[in-house]
Image (cartoon, grey):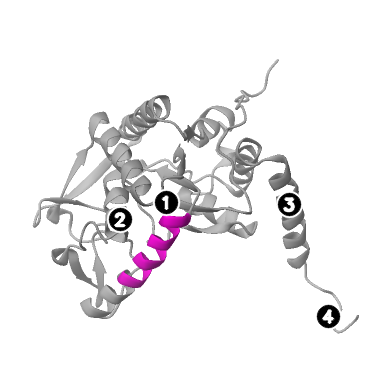
Amino acid sequence: MKTRTTIEIPSSQIKLSYQGSFLSLGSCFADKMGNHLIGLKFNGLSNPLGVLYNPISILRILKICLTTEEVDQEHFVEVEEQTMHLDFHSDHSAGSKEQLGKVLEDSCSICKSCIEQAEVFIFTLGSAYVYRYRHTDRIISNCHKLPSSLFERQLLSVETVTGCLEEMITVIRGVNPRARFIWTVSPVRHLADGLTNNSVSKARLRTSVHSIVERMEHNDYFPSLEIMMDDLRDYRYYDADMIHPSSVALKYIFDVFKDRHFGIETREISNKVSDIQRRLGHRAFFPQSQ
């Protein structure tokens, strides 16, 4: 009797290599994927402008980095004696608007350089739910725990999400024609939206990505959501919060990612790097010895 459902995932034509570079953008799961690659000494960046959950916010960040859209001056807000910006994660904060402006400018400059050079872009979409700032009537990235009365929540349509993804590709290829894209939908469960709403949200993201991959060259889908929900369908693969994948689940998902998006040579090098990293993590019992 079968005890689990294993997803058969064929190898992808989009490969990461140590000769090239990558950029991972999107939800907190994008951080996990990107930081794992950085840990294996790949050249690239992981969410350099903080976590971004919805496709509209990812698109806006790309445009700001490439200077085709300005930072919205009305989206600077004061939170607990710190200045933050509604289009950026709370990782980016400062003591004043001027200081934060400089921080954002520097981060965007670094991100722009990566956008122009990266061969592979990994986008992890977290939610099709967005929050609209009533004061400017614009969709923002992060509410920074401000009063809910300042925002209006809405669910993006499949058409809107698909249009955002298409524009993201167009914007990036405008400065980097060789760019290739790996799309994934975050396996993290957004319980704040409610389980049924979370399902609707993920379904819209997944449908939009499917449309992109079916119609556009050099785009591929990595099924992290399906691996978590259909292969690792057990609470033992979740952290204590029952929302985020556990370290065991993350390792399993990343091993599948390596099988799909690493060539033979890249896999051999990454295994050696992983072994060295593991040895470096060991504590020496006699550090004074030879």
Q: Which secondary structure lies at badge 4?
A: loop
Marks 2/4: CA–CA distance: 47 Å
Is the C terminus in the top left, top right, bottom left or bottom right quadrant?
bottom right
Does 107 appear in magenta? yes
What kind of element bears circle 3? helix
Circle 1 residues within 10 Å: few <14, some 14–19, many ≥20: many
10 Å neighbourhood of mark 2: few (<14), some, or many (≥20)?
many
Query: What's the CA distance linking mark 2 and mark 3?
Result: 33 Å
State which region is magenta.
Answer: 105-117
* Image coords of residue 173 (percent x, y): 37, 45
User: How many residues crowd around disc 4 within 10 Å: few (fewer than 14), some, or many (20 or more)?
Assistant: few
Gap in angstroms between the C-alphas marked 1 and 4: 40 Å
Query: Which one is earlier in the sequence, the residue at label 2 or at label 4?
Result: 2
User: Which residue, given by chain and number where applicable, does mark 1 sit on?
Assistant: 25
For marks 2 and 4, give the one nearer the viewer.
Answer: 2
Q: Nearer the viewer, residue 184 or 269?
A: 269
Q: CA distance from mark 3 to mark 1?
A: 24 Å
Which residue bears the numbered disc 3?
269
Q: Residue 140 location, x and y as percent?
A: 22, 53
Residue at (34% x, 68% y) in the render: 92
Task: Please give the name of the residue rendered at 53% of the width and 35% of the height, measured from the top-left corner.
Answer: 228
* Position in image of residue 284 (x %, y %): 82, 73
Label 3 or label 1, whichever lies nearer to me, is 3
| Marks 3 and 4, the one that precedes in the sequence | 3
- Name the amino acid type tagged 2: Ile
Q: Which mark is residue 287?
A: 4
Measured in 3D between alpha carbons, the distance from the residue under mark 2 to the one under mark 1, in whole angstroms, is 10 Å
Residue 84, x across and y down, in percent: 26, 69
Above or below, comparing residue 92 to residue 206 in the picture:
below
